[in-house]
Image (cartoon, rainbow, N blue to C red):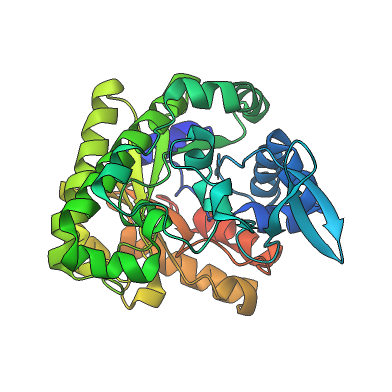
């Protein structure tokens, strides 16, 4: 069974030969695992995707996530990596040890009416609020699927060809909800806005829904049939279930319904960190095909998530990210085996993964231990 079919059968509730293994490798870890300079990946976005795939393959993964970096020119100044514009003028310092974002020196180097800036807003940081009014919300540009085709069409086609039947690829819709909103208002102000400026929150999130749908359609047009929908901050460690049901759940449903209409075969899973246990049933009812990453640092287990979610939705995750640094391979096999037993329904509906994005210091041997666990806990051994 090839990885793509294994993944799709798992989402469809069809028994597979073994549990799919899809830990959350990001660019920084991929760079370290493959011995690639981060700067090279920042300047060559196609290379960045291929190195994500290489890292996944060398650690026994079934799939790699296809993320999109902005096109950037860089230079070194006083030991720091600096992004520069087409004329060589400084834009800001790149946070190499964090999320690879450029911290802009001037707020005017980000425009909400520029689709390029909106598309890569998480990589162009500045503390000034980007939206201050409902009129501003209306002016937010939404990059459509043609924008993404021009930016990444060839790179994704190359990745699909290279993956062949050896590796499944997962498309990324980015965020439509709270994580999206925070990029326009800042974390602290966003929390006040949920209570004091609900109309502004809804207006900005409406643009987020449009954005996630267009990005998802691009991924589908490229041939990707599993999509990730992110809102890492929309958890009960940050907001209440009441606010989640007012602002987050309905928007997730809008995105899922639109993309399922566009392609009924496509499978969509969410990535929401922290404590999601109080809204697990809501997530299952929002049209999602899968729920992740079941972060144990949020204070719940895969077994508890399965109890809340029922048996008709796929669960993904559950392995503590810190274990990838501190656990021995044998300890990782034990933890991963427990997660598989707790999450699977009739040898399906569970994907073995980390509870969030892996730290850059994650060890290759602990990643490979996930595959060992998946090969040990199979239908023949249960």
Residue at 23%, 24% in the rendered image: 261
Choose top left, top right, bottom left or bottom right for residue 301: bottom left
In screen coordinates, is 53 left or right of 119? right
Q: Residue at x 37, y 51 (%)?
A: 180
Q: Is residue 67 visible?
A: yes
- Dividing the picture into quadrants, the one containing residue 33 is bottom right
In the image, residue 130 lies at what x, y percent?
42, 53
Judged left or right of residue 226, residue 199 is left
In the image, 172 versus 302, the foreground residue is 172
Q: How far across and down, in percent of the image, does residue 115 sit?
A: 48, 33
Please identify the quadrant where the C terminus is shown.
Answer: bottom left
Q: Is residue 310 shown to the viewer in this render?
A: no
Would you place residue 74 above or below residue 358 in this image? above
Name the residue: 27% across, 37% down.
255
Find residue 193 and report its horizontal and vertical position in percent. 24, 64
Above or below residue 192? Residue 50 is above
Q: Nearer the viewer, residue 263 or 67?
A: 67
The foreground one among 345 and 29 is 29
Q: Is residue 352 above or below residue 268?
A: below
């Amino acid at each position: 069974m090839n990885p793509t079919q294994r993944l799709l059968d798992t989402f469809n509730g069809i028994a597979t030969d073994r549990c799919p293994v899809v830990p959350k490798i990001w660019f920084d870890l991929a760079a370290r695992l493959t011995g690639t300079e981060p700067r090279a990946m920042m300047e060559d976005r196609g290379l960045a995707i291929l190195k994500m795939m290489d890292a996944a393959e060398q650690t026994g993964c079934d799939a790699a996530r296809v993320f999109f970096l902005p096109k950037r020119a860089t230079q070194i100044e006083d030991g720091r990596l600096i992004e520069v514009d087409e004329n060589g003028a400084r834009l800001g310092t790149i946070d190499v040890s964090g999320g690879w974002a450029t911290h802009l020196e001037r707020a005017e180097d980000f425009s909400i009416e520029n689709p390029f800036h909106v598309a890569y807003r998480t990589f162009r940081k500045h503390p000034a609020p980007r939206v201050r009014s409902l009129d501003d919300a209306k002016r937010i540009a939404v990059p459509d699927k043609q924008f993404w085709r021009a930016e990444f069409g060839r790179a994704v086609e190359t990745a699909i060809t290279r993956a062949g039947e050896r590796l499944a690829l997962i498309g990324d819709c980015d965020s439509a909800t709270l994580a999206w909103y925070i990029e326009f208002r800042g974390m602290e102000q966003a929390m006040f806005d949920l209570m004091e400026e609900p109309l502004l929150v809804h207006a900005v999130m409406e643009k987020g829904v449009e954005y996630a749908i267009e990005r998802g359609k691009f991924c589908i047009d490229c041939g990707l049939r599993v999509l990730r929908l992110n809102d890492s901050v929309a958890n009960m460690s940050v907001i209440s279930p009441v606010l989640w049901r007012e602002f987050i759940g309905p928007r997730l449903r809008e995105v899922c319904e639109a993309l399922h209409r566009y392609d009924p075969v496509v499978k969509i899973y969410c990535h929401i960190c922290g404590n999601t246990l109080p809204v697990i049933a809501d997530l299952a009812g929002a049209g999602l095909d899968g729920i992740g990453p079941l972060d144990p640092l949020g204070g719940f287990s895969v077994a508890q998530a399965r109890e809340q979610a029922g048996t008709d939705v796929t669960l993904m995750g559950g392995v503590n990210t810190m274990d990838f640094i501190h656990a021995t391979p044998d300890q990782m096999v034990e933890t991963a085996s427990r997660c598989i037993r707790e999450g699977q329904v009739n040898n399906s509906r569970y994907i073995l993964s980390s509870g969030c994005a892996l730290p850059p210091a994650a060890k290759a041997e602990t990643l490979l231990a996930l595959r060992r666990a998946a090969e040990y806990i199979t239908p023949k051994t249960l």
